[in-house]
Image: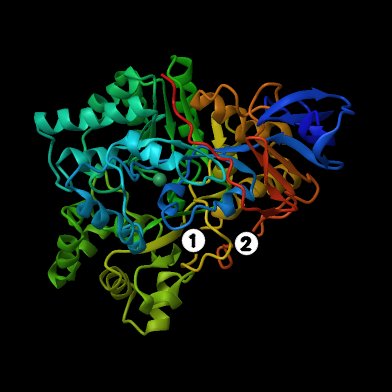
Amino acid sequence: MVYDILVKNGRIISGEGNPWYHGEIGIKEGRIAKIKPKINDDAEKIIDAHGLIVCPGFIDIHSHTDYILPVNRSQESTLCQGITTTMVGMCGDGMAPIPKGKEEDFKKKIAKIDPVLQQFDYPYHTFKEYLEYNDGKRNSANLAFCVGYGNIRWAGGQAFENRVATPEEMERMKSYLREAMEAGAFGMSTGLIYAPQIFAKTEEIIELATIVGEYNGLYFSHIRSEGKEIIKAIKETIEIVEKSGCRGGQIAHHKVAGEQFWGGSIHTLKLFEDANERGIQMTYDQYPYNRGMSDLATALPPWTREGNNDVILERIKDPEIQEKIKKDVEKGIEGWENWIKNEGMKNIYVSTVGSDKWRDVATLSIPEITKLKGFVDDWETFFALLIDNKLVVGITIESMGEDDVRRIMKGRYQMVGTDGAGIPASFSSGAYHPRFFGTYPRILAKYVREEKLLTLEEAIRKMTSFPASRLGLQDRGLIREGDWADIVMFDPLYVKDTATYEQPYQLPEGIPYVIVNGVIVVQNGKKNKKSPGKVLRHLC
Ligand SMILES: [Zn+2]
């Protein structure tokens, strides 16, 4: 047999943004061996791609799949969308490093994401060991890793305190960061609305990001504000990139949140234009929905989030403190993204909860829960949710205007990222955001086919070669001879997302084949048990 797989009769979109062409692809030993108008050689497996677009596998540049991997490694929801490479370690958090002696503390910390994560052992300490641990696991898709600044700050010693790091702590943080970059992290991410990162000053981040710059890495950021102070927050990111010498900056899940700020993307996109004109590479990723997803505790004022979870819980049980929280929400605090004031309780929907007692409220808004449970007002619901669930309350927030979503999507510096995670369709926990299942097909259906906001070729470029070049992946993101055979095939007339906020765990339609490293992983729209994925490393 000349080829392992031969893809015949398809329309190829190469990923560079060029128009489609008729061509056939011979795959051998994991790579694209031949592309020609017609290939008549024999192959182990022949796929008839008549009526289908054949394009590079999608590169999800912003994912939280690393939180799911200990529980389930199938990545079904992302693979079935066509994602063949997933970038994790986003929004400033992640699963490494875990310094010796801090294993139990790590479990407590990670329980805030999902209590189930406490039950696992994390048999590694350094970032290098973490990557090697993942090398040894079955991966359906390729994984690329960023190191989370929150993890570095926690490992370096100042944990959840609101103060400036001491020189010794800074040195420790730098050595953890250096180790991660040396091991193959693609950069450092921050999540500056989350504790303890919310307490970090710009100068501290610049000093650390300098290490990332030494390794030619990227600075990824969930910025301090996506609403009222968004301009200031983007400017801070540009300043960090410029002063630290990082190769470039990437703003996570770019959006304008809060109805009173809608239209702001006209100004935010200008900041990207200006920075790039000055020679500072600034890009962003986006998912195509009007709701964001986060956790309810982040709606609390920053001063209430100092210390570990036990301390925070005790604090917010105090009726006097509760009154003060209400007042702060009403007045606002400079530099704090005040969701309850900006978006309103009615736009906050519960997605996941830590306690079984509250399972019935998943998908409901806070006022709907108030009604269901017979509480006096939404504040009572708010505190009861946080206290009963020990702060583990996932939420989606209706916050974005469609005009901004469209303008941001069309922007020159936009690439696609789910900000979701790979989970199985049989997942039983809560009701996560539909973006976990629908991000890429939703863009292809709604924004390409129906609304014609983007051409098909342009949308695919934003899903493939653009993120690949951003990450410095030299042999992925294109349909090109010699490159790794990461390929997705979809029907441009029928591809669509089916996941909704009410029914989020539904696979998309119209994506019959996905190939990772020359191995078929999705066939007739169903994931098989193959695991050809690799752990990718950043080469400095
Ligand atoms: Zn984020």
Q: Which residue has dot 1 on it? A: 432
Q: Tell me the number on the disc at residue 511.
A: none
Name which residue lies at 17% across and 52% down. 306
Residue 368 at least partly seen: no
Name which residue lies at 13% across and 69% down. 320
Residue 337: percent from left, percent from top = 32, 49
**Left or right placement of residue 111 versus residue 9 in this view:** left
Residue 312 in the image: above or below residue 131 = below
Residue 157 in the image: above or below residue 506 = above
Residue 497 quadrant: bottom right
Residue 98 at least partly seen: yes
Cα separation, mark 1 vs mark 2, equals 11 Å
**Left or right placement of residue 35 versus residue 375 in this view:** right
Helix or strand or loop: what does disc 2 sit on? loop
Whether pointer 1 and pointer 2 mark residues with C-beta atoms closer than 8 Å, the reply is: no
Residue 425: percent from left, percent from top = 58, 62
Mark 1 or 2, nearer chain start: 1
Q: Tell me the number on the disc at residue 506.
A: 2
Residue 526: percent from left, percent from top = 69, 55
Q: Quadrant of the N terminus?
A: top right
Few, some or many C-alpha atoms within 10 Å of disc 2 (few <14, some 14-19, many ≥20)? some
**Left or right placement of residue 518 versus residue 239 in this view:** right
**Left or right placement of residue 272 versus residue 374 in this view:** right
Q: Quadrant of the C terminus?
A: top left
Q: Amino acid at mark 1?
A: Tyr
Name which residue lies at 42% across and 66% down. 352
Question: For the view shown, which residue lies furthest in the bottom direction?
Answer: 374
Q: Amino acid at mark 2?
A: Gln
